[in-house]
Image (cartoon, rainbow, N blue to C red):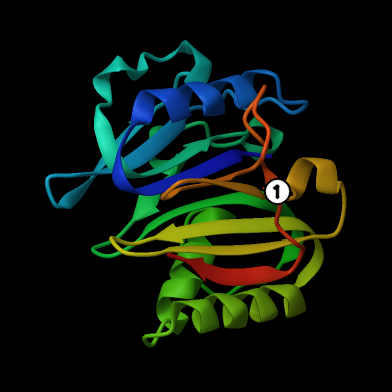
Amino acid sequence: MCRILSVTSDTAFECMHHLEKLSEISRISKEYQGHGWGCSWWEDGAWRHYKNLRPIWEDDFSRFGPSTRLVAHARSASLDHAIVLEYNMPYYDERYVYVFNGGLRGVTLKAEGRIGAEKIFNLMRRLDKGDTVDAMRRALDIIDKRTRYIRAINVILADRDTVYLATMFNEDPGYFQMHHRREGSTLMLCSQPYPGESGWETIPNHTVRAFR
């Protein structure tokens, strides 16, 4: 399924570098990741957003300058379904930027949304009463009880101060397990380690936590 990425730092980094890494991960993925992509980055005190239906590896990243926060998503649409720009992530509201990857079968989830990823975002938002980690845990518990089978759920929520991660999988950890790496004040969360780079660590299954 989709590939996701978050980068945060106390000092500005080049978005282009990290998008090139996500592009390479997506291009060589064992599952096709070419159903469009999108990203959100922090600029002048606000989130900016970009989406494109082209495969990420065919796009030009020179338009993206330095930032201290970046969230990106390369889409692998289930059964090549609904290849339209509106379904591309990140999704966002006045506070959060959200990306998801995973696969669920037999879901009976009561939440607004056109596709499953959007429904999960809206469920987490509805449950959030001020404790984002608790809202994510409660959402995963509801989804687990109302889904016949979960291949995986990986969610990144980011606001201006914090990145939140929820991850669980029941198969193929080599593909679904999330990874992270710190380099000074820079924190990277990604579906896979950057090609050719060491120092990445796996994130344990069933992790729900905040990164600051």
32 relative position to 175: left or right? left
Identified at 56% across, 58% down, the residue is 155
Q: Is residue 187 above or below residue 72?
A: below
Q: Residue 30 in the image: x percent, y percent?
A: 78, 26
Between 169 and 89, the one lying in front of the other is: 169
Question: Which residue, as the protein is rendered here, is positioned at the far left?
Answer: 44
Q: Residue 137 in the image: x percent, y percent?
A: 61, 79
Q: Residue 69 in the image: x percent, y percent?
A: 33, 46
Identified at 86% across, 46% down, the residue is 172
Identified at 38% across, 88% down, the residue is 129
Q: Residue 77 in the image: x percent, y percent?
A: 62, 36
The residue at which mark 1 appears reads as 201
Quarter location, residue 151: bottom right
Q: Is residue 53 above or below residue 198?
A: above
* Label 1 Cα neighbours within 10 Å, binned few <14 / some 14-19 / many ≥20: some
81 relative position to 79: left or right? left
Quarter location, residue 152: bottom right
Q: Is residue 139 above or below residue 5?
A: below
- Secondary structure of residue under mark 1: strand
In which quadrant will I find the N terminus? top right
Amino acid tagged 1: Glu
Identified at 73% across, 69% down, the residue is 206
Question: Which residue, as the protein is rendered here, is positioned at the far bottom?
Answer: 129
Tell me if I can see residue 55 in this picture: no
